[in-house]
Amino acid sequence: MTQPAHLPYSGIATFARAPLRDLGDDWHADVGVLGIPFDIALGFRPGARFAPRALREASLRSVPPFTGLDGRTRLEGVTFADAGDVALPSLEPELARGRITQAARALRERCRVPVFLGGDHSVTYPLLRAFADVPALHVVQLDAHLDFSDTRNDTRYSNSSPFRRAAEALPNLVHITTIGLRGLRFDPEAVAAARARGHTLIPAEAVGSGLADVLEQLPRGENVYLSVDADGLDPSVLPGTSSPEPDGLGYGQAMGIIRAVAAHNAVVGLDLVELAPNLDPSGLSALIGARLVMETLCEVFDAGN
């Protein structure tokens, strides 16, 4: 029996109305979505644990395929599956990291492009551990903050340190390009360590001065994991995030960067983190986040990834 189409505010909220799949079952999809409702590694305002649910609800506004003004249809025939959320303990971060890595590995086995909905940015470290087999892995990070600190408040696993831990643990992680950096507070040791490792650090003002120059600094012909921190965008665009910084990326600038990454590289995974929907009662932040994920997938599949 054919089910009637639901309006965006009705029905069960899976991402883009994808069928709900169990990671213990045998299935395959072009896109697999996994929620990581974890935010106990934050240094400021909590709420990112609620993002996977909010992004699923917001995604019901934009269910593929899409036909644009130019008549082009996008994501037609691309299959989606929603693998639900990782079951995480509330106050056992080491156990949580292990479960995140295990679930991410299982998702990778079942889809072409895994999408992870965080969660604070600390979850990107255990996610990247699931990509330890990818040759010459590059990370492109859209973020106001470097997230390469060795420690913060005596912990090595906060949302300030995911890429430092990943760089230490993964020999295949060869380069990180961080775009959108800004603000008054930077850890000098982290900046020095990232530069010593050869990472590319691009401030937000450089994007505003000339996007074309920024695009020239992106990797080409590489395996890329794309990590998008909600605070990479300007808070006038996406206010619902733990640590907003003014003068961030506009939506069009962010998508210009993502479009170039997808066009010239193999995108092996994507995460969206640090969205805190409770901090934006308008719901705009979740809508923008879901739109960014969906439009990124359009670019990835347009490019033939």
Image (cartoon, helix red, strand yellow):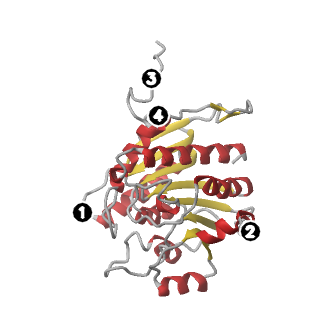
Q: Which is nearer the N-term, disc 2 or disc 3?
A: 3
Q: Where is mark 2, residue-wise?
A: 213
CA gap, disc 2 and disc 3: 44 Å
**First-in-chain label (3 vs 1):** 3
Marks 4 & 1, CB-CB < 8 Å contact: no
Res. 168 visible in picture: yes
- Neighbour class for label 1 at 10 Å: few (<14), some, many (≥20)? few
Mark toward the start of the polypeptide (4 vs 2):
4
Q: How far apart are the two marked residues, 4 and 3, measured between alpha carbons?
A: 9 Å
At label 2, the amino acid type is Asp
Q: Which residue is mark 4?
A: 60
Three-letter amino acid code of the residue under disc 1: Leu
Side (left or right) of 110 relative to 211: left
298 horizontally vs 40: left or right: right
Quote the CA–CA distance across marks 2 and 1: 44 Å
Classed neighbour count for the residue bearing mark 3: other residues with Cα under 10 Å, few (<14), some (14–19), many (≥20): few
Q: Are marks 4 and 3 in contact (CB under 8 Å)?
A: yes
Q: Which amino acid, mark 4?
A: Leu
